[in-house]
Amino acid sequence: MALIVKKFGGSSVKDAEHVMNVAGIIVDEYKKGNDVIVVVSAQGDTTDDLIEKAVEINPSTPLKREMDMLLTAGEQISIALLAMAIDKLGCPVISLLGWQAGFSTDSHHGKARIKKINTERMKTELSKGNIIIVAGFQGLNKYDDLTTLGRGGSDTSAVAIAAAMSADRCQIYTDVDGVYTADPRKVKGAVKMDEVQYDEMLEMATLGAQVLNNRSVEMAKKYNVELEVLSSLERKPGTIVKEHVKMEKTLIRGVAKDTSVTTISVVGLKDQPGVAFKLFNKLAQYKVNVDIILQSVGRHGTKDITFTVSHEQQDDAVKAMESMKGVFEYQDLKVNNSFSKISIVGAGMESNPGVASKMFEALYDADINIHMISTSETKISVLIDTELADKAVQAVHDAFIG
Ligand code: ADP
Ligand code: ASP
Ligand code: MG
């Protein structure tokens, strides 16, 4: 007998028919004699719809604790419905909210980190023969307040359970049949990968390939949890994410797009030591994750610093910069959220100088202007206008993967 963790995303449970389909997959696994723990997301666009409701009440700063109170409700609905569906198919089942399944997190509402999972309740329910359905994306902090793990966090809930319970398999079911070289819904010629390494997948996920949440990949690597990404609609093998994969000939593994990019330019800063430190220290205090950083050459005693953050963190970043007034001077703050980041991912970028020029040539041929560039050993990213993002991904994918 094996212990299998299965996670189903929102699109896999979007309506009654899909919930029954998922229940069928779970029951088949259970009837093989295996223990099954399921993590499920909110149905379809429920989380987005709930966010809309909050924005109607307060467009700028809804209370973060109350946002979590609201958003956790989405997963509460889907666990109950899925448990009812499994019961209808005649198997013993129990649904558990995150806290009932033992998820303790820190208090960072909206992007909490899992601190510990107390597995006692899950073990008891398995010993009673129950299939367990756990609400993804949520936990409880030390004040007994509900928290959420950040968008796409149900993937992380599933990996965390697989690690804590030493599961034999962790399967992430979604609406595509695996991980591709680019989003298969958007990019013609995207190729499915049989296997992908943790580090490559982590890079792809961090750079916008939403098929897996990046924290879930980070955790899978840390606890050596092998993942399978597969379709909830077609029963066929998916993509395995693990440490060692068969060597691939290709240098470029994939192309990713992130449309959630805000650039913030702090214009007319004094050109003196300590300015960058104070600025990024303040952003850190506001828990803002900064991605690309660009500093202009100093001129006439002033300089500009431009950095990028996700749309989610734009308000916090602006607040952090406004709070700097009086600490040090700057002339203007420019905010732009109409850029997207296009990245190519692969090993050994820096030792292959031709790669960058090939990427820039593909964008030039497609008449796409580049606003910012950032490179590392494993990726090259460019910032371009969001309205050209899909065209850019296709052009770059055509150039490298064909
Ligand atoms: P779920 O609701 O199951 O969590 P998501 O919408 O979060 O599903 O993730 C699945 C989607 O990720 C797919 O529908 C696909 O459009 C998108 N996607 C983006 N990049 C990739 C990629 N490289 N490979 C596969 N899917 C990708
Ligand atoms: N329901 C949450 C979201 O939409 C969590 C998830 O789907 O993983 O982000
Ligand atoms: Mg997802």
Image (spheres, grey):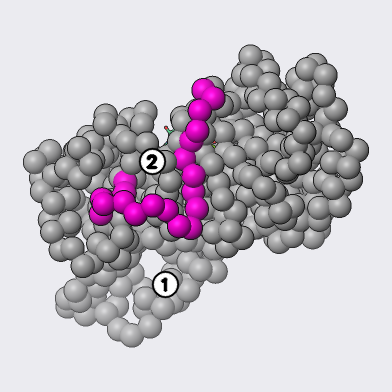
**Callout 2 touching callout 1 (CB < 8 Å):** no
Secondary structure character of the magenta stretch overall: loop
Is residue 5 rendered magenta in the image? no
| Total numbered labels placed on residues in the image | 2
Q: Say which residue label 2 marks.
A: 193
Is residue 236 rendered magenta in the image? yes
Residue 135 locus on image (x, y percent): 72, 38
Q: Relative to residue 159, is residue 306 depicted above or below?
A: below
Residue 331 can be seen in this image: no
| Helix, strand or loop under label 1 | helix
Residue 126 locus on image (x, y percent): 84, 41
Q: Residue at x 75, y 37 (%)?
A: 34
Q: Residue at x 82, y 24 (%)?
A: 91
Residue situated in front as seen by the camera: 217 or 275: 217
Residue 273 can be seen in this image: yes
* Left or right for 322, reference 103: left
Q: Tell me which corner region of the image, top left, top right, bottom left or bottom right, holds residue 79.
A: top right
Q: Tell me which corner region of the image, top left, top right, bottom left or bottom right, holds residue 263.
A: bottom left
Q: At label 1, which amino acid type do we have?
A: Leu
* Left or right for 73, reference 173: right
| Helix, strand or loop under label 2 | loop
Q: Residue at x 73, y 25 (%)?
A: 27
Residue 133 locus on image (x, y percent): 75, 35
Classify the position of the C terminus by image quarter. Answer: top left
Please identify the residue farthest to the top as the structure is shown: 17
Q: At label 2, which amino acid type do we have?
A: Met
